Image (cartoon, grey):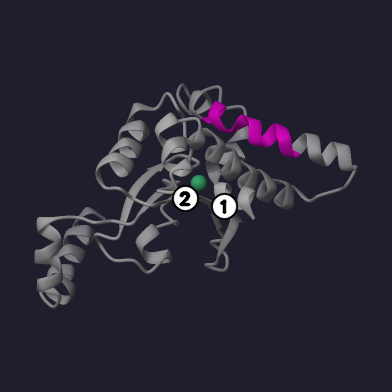
Amino acid sequence: MITTLLDGNRRFVKEIFDVERDYFEDLAKMQRPTVLWIGCSDSRVPVNTITQTKPGEVFVHRNVANIVATNDWNLSAVLEFSINHLKIPDIVVCGHYGCGGIAALDEDCRDDRYIPIWLNNAYKAKERVDEKIAGLRIKLSEEQRMQLIVEENVRLQLEHLREYPFVRNAMEEKKLSIHGWVYDMTTGDIKVVQRDTVACVEF
Ligand code: CO
């Protein structure tokens, strides 16, 4: 497998890098991405492929279940750099149906040490959906329920994003919009779950 990656890189240099050498030489001097993508680490959700974007266009942070945790210094530094230095105007939190991290909210991960701690940041999404289903007295398949939790998790992580004062300030100054999306890996489609929340309030 590892040699496949290096073979792929040699093909990339020959078929893409050398062909678009001017583009990559400019890029080597400076990056100007216009979107910060916060997505799941899942190998089936590769941002540049599913959005048909090129190197240099999307700044990326990925973790298990596309979580925004305000005590996560890794993401916090990514956010700070994106907003204060790169001046990125749009942040996308993108979940995906069939997310193993979200499915694990129902599982007893007793043998794992870190996964349950990490998933605590998404637990409220499951609680909200289960409460709603119970309140409405409707019968949903397990797959439908999971899809709702995936969508609710995206909304929850957008809420976490707004807990950062510098994110809120940038939004209030109309310098930043945040968006909630879900990728469907059975069709390739991206569903917009939540549009820029500040704009929504105004309309
Ligand atoms: Co996932």
Which residue matches tag 1?
199
The reply to whether the C-beta atoms of the residues labelled 2 and 1 are less than 8 Å apart is yes
User: Could you tell whether 52 is left or right of 107 in the image?
Assistant: left
Q: Viewer-proximal residue, 105 or 150?
A: 150
At 88% across and 47% down in the image, what residue appears? 138
Q: Main secondary structure of the magenta part?
A: helix
In this rendering, the answer to whether 28 lies above or below 23 is above
For numbered disc 1, what is the local secondary structure?
Answer: helix
Asked if the stretch drawn in magenta spans residue 122, the answer is: yes
Q: Viewer-proximal residue, 71 or 189?
A: 71
The part of the image, by quadrant, that contains residue 9 is bottom left
For numbered disc 2, what is the local secondary structure?
Answer: strand
Residues drawn in magenta: 119-129
Which residue matches tag 2?
177
In this rendering, the answer to whether 21 lies above or below 198 is below
Q: Nearer the viewer, mark 2 or mark 1?
A: 1
Q: Viewer-proximal residue, 31 or 66?
A: 31
- Which amino acid type corresponds to the residue marked 1 in the rendered image? Ala
Q: Which mark is residue 36?
A: none
At 57% across and 33% down in the image, what residue appears? 122
